[in-house]
Image (cartoon, rainbow, N blue to C red):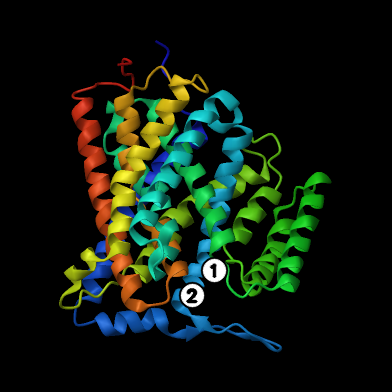
Amino acid sequence: MKRIQLSKLFTDFFHSEKTGGIVLIVCTVLSILIANSTFGETYLHFWHQSIGFNVGSIDMHHPVEYWVNDGLMAIFFLMIGLEIERELYAGELSNVRNALLPVIAAMGGMLTPALFHFLWNHGTTEQAGIGIPMATDIAFALGILSLLGNRVPASLKIFLAALAIIDDLGAIIVIAVFYTEGFSLAYFGSAMGIFTLLIIFNRLRINYLIVYLIPGVFMWYFMLKSGVHATISGILLAFAIPFGDGSEKSISYKLQHFLHKPVAFFILPVFALANTGIVFEPGWQKGFGTKNTLGIMSGLILGKPIGIFLFCYAAVKTKICRLPSELSWKHITGAGMLAGIGFTMSIFITLLAFNDATTIVNAKIAVLSASVIAGAAGFLYLKAITPGLPDSSRPRG
């Protein structure tokens, strides 16, 4: 059986996410430890202190945490957008038959967890958290999978990466549609006007990155003021930048390759440090009994693997798509478990969904707990079904 070979860019991406996942774990643990130490108050105050500048009548003073979540994360979404674009034009998603399975898997992995949360929280104020268990953290999921080395097929790595990327796209749509406050048509129209201009530049084959990045900053500002979350501008900018032939000479490739390390080793770690400084007050365990926590944890731990498996099984049995030759249903189950690692996107949606501090803390604890359980379960399960496998091939079965 011919083994699937991983492209150079995918391999670079996979190893970047692998190491980035380890860094995220370290930063998360460090943030929690500091927040609960004698330096906790100073640490939390740092993220809440205001910094910025004035440009004429425009006041751009915001808390450090705000700059991280609305500024730096826009760059993270830019890279995600470039990865989605690459997959659509030249990757696994460029072939409809290959793309269908992870697309359908992602649908199951978003709708089923959302249903779990809805069943627990419908009619309550916590219903706004329905989007929290829908997300999959690419860095953590691929990081855990990488610990298995060549025990798992290359096609499973591609399947999980494509699934997580589509999952992120779904989460982005959810953010844009459901987590918009104080919508301003004027500012939104200005942002979309810039996006249209960038698309025209694209069609005119203007291949100077600076021509896209400078207007992209203004698009970010107008999107920020529009009420639609500013990070959406990162996705729009990614699709405006010319993909070209996808070679190493294209500006899309160069920017994506350049962003891998800053995102993996600076932006996401800073996001983790800024948003996981959870103070465990006396009685914090009671938060596990809330319906919102139960909805988040059941959605990530149970909803993800159940939804991914059932949607994939139905699609294959109805011959809508086929299971890659290297993969078995056990692999799909294991990938579904790892997809239950929410972390970055889940915490991000938590911050958009709620304003109450206690609810946010409980939701973060739920996301972290569920992600640990899902990651450990997925790792142990995949390790158990591929004992002592010396290479990346695995018979179907």
Q: Which residue is mark 2?
A: 66
The image quarter containing residue 214 is: bottom right
Residue 351 appears anywhere in the view = yes
Please count the marks in the image. Answer: 2
Residue 135 appears anywhere in the view = no
Q: Which amino acid, mark 1?
A: Gly
The picture places residue 257, in percent across and down from the top left corner, at: 54, 46
Q: Which amino acid, mark 2?
A: Tyr
The image quarter containing residue 198 is: bottom right
Q: Secondary structure at mark 1?
A: helix
Which disc is residue 391 wearing? none
Residue sitting at 45 percent across and 22 percent down?
Answer: 316
Q: Give me the C-alpha separation between circle 2 and circle 1.
A: 7 Å
Residue sitting at 26 percent across and 66 percent down?
Answer: 290
Q: Which residue is mark 1?
A: 71
Return the residue nearer the eye: 138 or 149.
Answer: 138
Left or right relative to 308: residue 244: right
